[in-house]
Amino acid sequence: MKKPTPLNDDDLALFRQELGQTRAFVQDKAHFPRPQKKKAITRHSEQTKLEQAEFFFSDEYEPDIDGQKVLSYVKAGHNSFLAKQLRRGEYTPELILDLHGLNKEDSKAELIALINACKKQHVQCASIMHGIGERVLKNKIPHYLVQHPDVIAMHQAPLEWGGKSAILILVDLHLPHDPKY
């Protein structure tokens, strides 16, 4: 990179003449308040997530989902075209949950947290990365999601969102006070 040449006296005088009547300004320092640290998750909220997970998700429930085919589900009363839209990638997940390394019980609590976050942040589509491994989570996660009243559709994720190791879900964002509910 070429080093700039310093101005000679004639150039500096011409520069000052062009600027006219100016004065140096005083640099003020702006002190912005530090952002508040997020509250640590308390044991109470962890306990609440576990209680909700046990309320919504049963290990004994076996939905009518064929594990050999591509995962596709739409809740009764909703347009079956939603699954096709998920498959085509017409919905983009705004939240992604990675369950790699978790057991079934921890996964249940994380699923509840994801669905609650979707509703709180008004996010309709989310991705759940379950991995393949021994297929424990791959087989159980859809069974749990079918049981939750706010999950209206799910489909195996397109390749760009994880393919066979992920699921895209659509969450019902209608709130109880909404007249459409």
Image: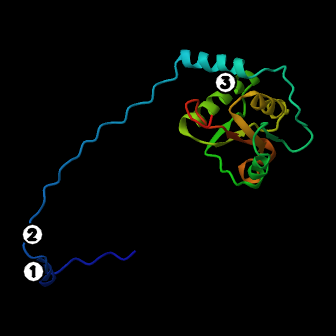
Residue beneath disc 2: 22
* Residue at the (78%, 50%) spot, across then down: 81
Q: Are marks 3 and 2 in contact (CB under 8 Å)?
A: no
Dot 3 or dot 1: first in sequence order is 1
* Within-10-Å neighbours for mark 1: few <14, some 14–19, many 20+: few
Q: In the rendered structure, which disc, 3 or 2, sits on the residue that comes first in sequence?
A: 2
Which secondary structure lies at badge 1? helix
Q: Which residue occupies 68% across, 51% down?
A: 91
Number of the label disc, if any, that sits on residue 119: none
**In the visual, does 96 lie left or right of 43?**
right
Which three-letter amino acid code belongs to the residue tagged 3? Ala
Specify few, some or many for label 2: CA neighbours under 10 Å numbering under 14, 14-19, or 20 or more. few
Name the amino acid, label 2.
Answer: Thr
Residue 154, image x, y percentages: 76, 41
Q: Nearer the viewer, mark 3 or mark 2?
A: 3
**Would you say 145 lies left or right of 10 here?**
right
Q: Quadrant of residue 61?
A: top right
| 171, 31: nearer the viewer | 171
Query: Where is residue 38, by image quadrant?
Result: top left
Q: Which residue is mark 1?
A: 17
In the rendered image, residue 30, in percent from the top left (x then y), is placed at 23, 46
- Could you tell whether 9 is left or right of 64 in the image? left
Q: Which mark is residue 109?
A: 3
Residue closest to the eye, 89 or 107: 89
Q: CA distance from mark 3 to mark 2?
A: 64 Å
Element type at mark 3: helix
Q: Are marks 3 and 1 in contact (CB under 8 Å)?
A: no
Q: Is residue 28 left or right of residue 151?
A: left
Give the colour scheme of this rendering.
Answer: rainbow
